[in-house]
Amino acid sequence: MPYYKPLKNLSNVDRKRIIAGIKRLRKQFADMNFPSKKTSESLILGTWNIRNFDDDRFNYGPRMIESFYYIAEIISHFGIIAVQEVCADLAPLDYLMVLLGQQYDYIVTDVTHSSLGGNEERLGFIYDKSKVRFKGVAGEIVLPKNMLISEETDRHRQFSRTPFGAEFQSGWFKFLFSTVHIYFGKNSLRSEQYARRVKEIEAVAKYLAKAAKGSETNQILVGDFNILKRGSAGFNALEDNGFTVACNNSGSNRDQTKYYDQISFRSRRNELTLMDPNRKDRVIQYFDSVFRSTDFLIYKSIIKKSLESKLKKANEDFTAATTKDKRRKAKNQITSLTAAGVSDESLEDYYDEWRTFQMSDHLPLWVELEIDFSDAYLDYLSTYQP
C-alpha cells in the first residue's frame, strides 16, 4: 500500500482531488477483477513505459505531485514491473519509491546516450521485496560481433537502447527478467527505420534464445517493442525465436490502437504458467480514472499558470541566447507555448497531450504467473528412488 501520509501537507483542494483520483483507480482495479497481490500462489508481473520519467525536455512537465501518487497506486498492484524511459536524474524515481514504501526497491541501468539513439534513458525493474527476491545477477545485453545488427549501408551496430536483464525469484519460480525499449524511427513498413526496429527485436530474441539453451532459467522478455500489431514483422520476430507472447485484445498506447508493449516467455522446464491464460484485457486504461478527458476544466488554471511560467522562461532564454541554435530553440518554444494558450480550445488540445506527460502515452501491461510448484514437487518426491 502506498505511503499516503504526505497528503496531509497539501492544500485541501489538492488533497481532495488526489484522494478522489486514487479512489477511482482502486475501484477500477476492483471492477476489472485485477488479482490480489497478497496470494502466495501467484506473481503479478508487468511492463510500463512511463513517458519521459521525469525531466522537462519536451516542455510539458515536470510531473505534479498528484501524478506520482497515481503512478505509485498503479505500481503498488504489481509484484514486479519493468519500466522504460526512466531519465538520467533518479530523484523523481527515488520520490516514487518513498510513496511506494520501504517494501519496494528498484534496479536500473545507466543511461544510453543520445549519440546512440538512446535519448539519455534508463531501463529497470521496480519490485516488492515481500514478493520478489533479486538473485544478485544483472547485466545489459551487448551483442557479440557475429550478432551485430546489420543495415543497408553495411554498418553493424548495437541496440539504440541497451536491453537489460536481471534474475529474480518469487516463491518457487526463478526467472531471468529482460526488458527493452526498441528503436522507433518511422511507422512506414517500407522505411529503413522500420527495418532497423524489426532487426533489433530479432537480435534480442535470438540472443536470449541462444542463452536459454545452456540455462535452466525461465526467460521473460518484456518492454516497449514498438510492435504495430499481431502478425507484423516485429511480432513474428519474437515467436520465430521461440517466445510465446501473452495475448491482449487491445493496444497499449493511449488510445489502445497500437501494440507497442509486449510480454513474452520462453520456458525450458514448462514452469511458466499463466493463472488466467484466456484473459484478453491485460492493459490498465488509467485515463478512465485520472486525468480524464472530461477533467480539462479541473486542470485549466494549472495549465495556464504553467504555460505563463514557461513562456516567461522561454523569453528570458531568447534574450540571453549566445548562439543561433539557442535562439532558434527558444523562439520555437515561445511560438508553441503562445499557440497553446490562445484559446480554451487550444488549451484543451494541449491538455490532451499534457496529461500523457503527467502519466504516460503508454498503458501498463500485466500477467499473473503461477509461483507455487509444491504439489508437483511432492508428487516427484513420492516416487523418488535414491
Image: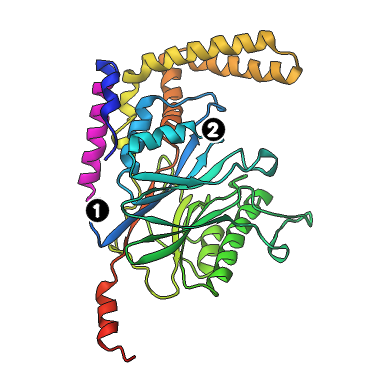
Whether residue 324 appears in magenta in the rendering, the answer is no
* Pointer 1 or 2: first along the chain: 1
Q: Which residues are magenta?
A: 15-34
x, y percent for residue 32: 24, 48
Left or right position of 14 against 242 = left
Q: Nearer the viewer, residue 286 or 2?
A: 2
Q: Residue at x 39, y 37 (%)?
A: 97
The kind of residue tagged 1 is: Pro
Prevalent SS, magenta region: helix
Q: Residue 18's image quarter?
A: top left
Q: Which residue is mark 1?
A: 35
Do tag 1 and tag 2 residues touch (Cβ < 8 Å)? no
Secondary structure of the residue carrying tag 2 is: loop
* Residue 313 in view of the camera: yes
Q: Which residue is mark 2?
A: 89
Q: Residue at x 30, y 88 (%)?
A: 384
Left or right position of 49 against 195 = left
Q: Residue 67's image quarter?
A: top left
Q: Nearer the viewer, residue 13 or 130?
A: 130
Whether residue 30 appears in magenta in the rendering, the answer is yes
Q: Residue furthest right?
A: 154
Quadrant of the image containing the C terminus:
bottom left
- Determine whether 15 is above or below 89 in the image: above
- Residue 122's tag is none
Q: Nearer the viewer, residue 315 or 102?
A: 102
